[in-house]
Amino acid sequence: MRLTKQTNYAVRMLMYCAANNEQLSRIPEIAKAYGVSELFLFKILQPLNKAGLVETVRGRNGGVRLGRPAEKITLFDVVKVTEDSFAMAECFEDDGDVDCPLIDSCGLNSALRKALNAFFDVLTEYTIDDLVKARPQINFLLGIDDLAPRRVTGVAAPAA
């Protein structure tokens, strides 16, 4: 199974926000840190915001921050929001367009479903906080130490 770039950068965005604890993160800064386009990050921001994984603060001094503590956001939370499909084979599709006489009694379907569930179980064991703490120099690596502090106590903008 291969995760999309959207999931990869969603995790990275959340890690950036967690490392930039208690301060607002700006999309241009996150984009620069990871060498990705701002437009791409804005696209990823929408489902993360809708799921409550991030909050956005509008205005001149606005930005983005985690919607809940980093230790409460699992990798599975991110993957289920950013991935469109977990179909590992044709028989996983829900569209009813499967042309296989073994669909209801195939060992492959059962084995793949078990593997997928094991994958989800592992993702549930890891949080954004785990990933950030695993890199003691994350702030330096992302250039966060060079940024001027921006604390905002304002109300988060409603989900888009």
Image (cartoon, rainbow, N blue to C red):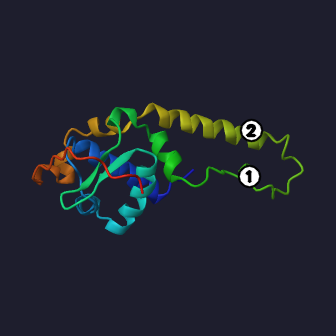
Lower sequence index among marks 1 and 2: 1
Q: In this view, does 43 lie above or below 108?
A: below
For this view, does 117 lie left or right of residue 82? right
Quadrant position of the C terminus in the picture: bottom left
Mark 1 or mark 2: which is in front? 1
For this view, does 137 lie left or right of residue 88? left
Q: Element type at marker 1?
A: loop
* Res 18 → quadrant: top left
| Residue at position x 31%, y 52% in the image | 56
Q: Element type at marker 2?
A: helix
- Residue most extreme to the right: 101
Residue 140, x across and y down, in percent: 16, 48
Residue 114 seen: yes
Tag 1 residue: 94
Identified by mark 1, the residue type is Asp
Q: Is residue 20 above or below residue 133?
A: below
Q: Label 1: few (<14), some or many (≥20) within 10 Å?
A: few
For this view, does 47 lie left or right of residue 142? right
Residue 27, x across and y down, in percent: 28, 60
Q: In this view, does 133 lie above or below 13?
A: above
Which of the two residues, 6 or 58, is positioned nearer the viewer here? 58
Tag 2 residue: 110
Residue 32, x across and y down, in percent: 24, 63
Residue 30, x across and y down, in percent: 26, 57
* Res 52 → quadrant: top left
Q: Label 2: few (<14), some or many (≥20) within 10 Å?
A: few
| Residue at position x 74%, y 55% in the image | 90
* Res 126 → quadrant: top left
Residue at mark 1 to residue at mark 2: CA–CA distance: 15 Å
| Mark count | 2
Residue 37 seen: no
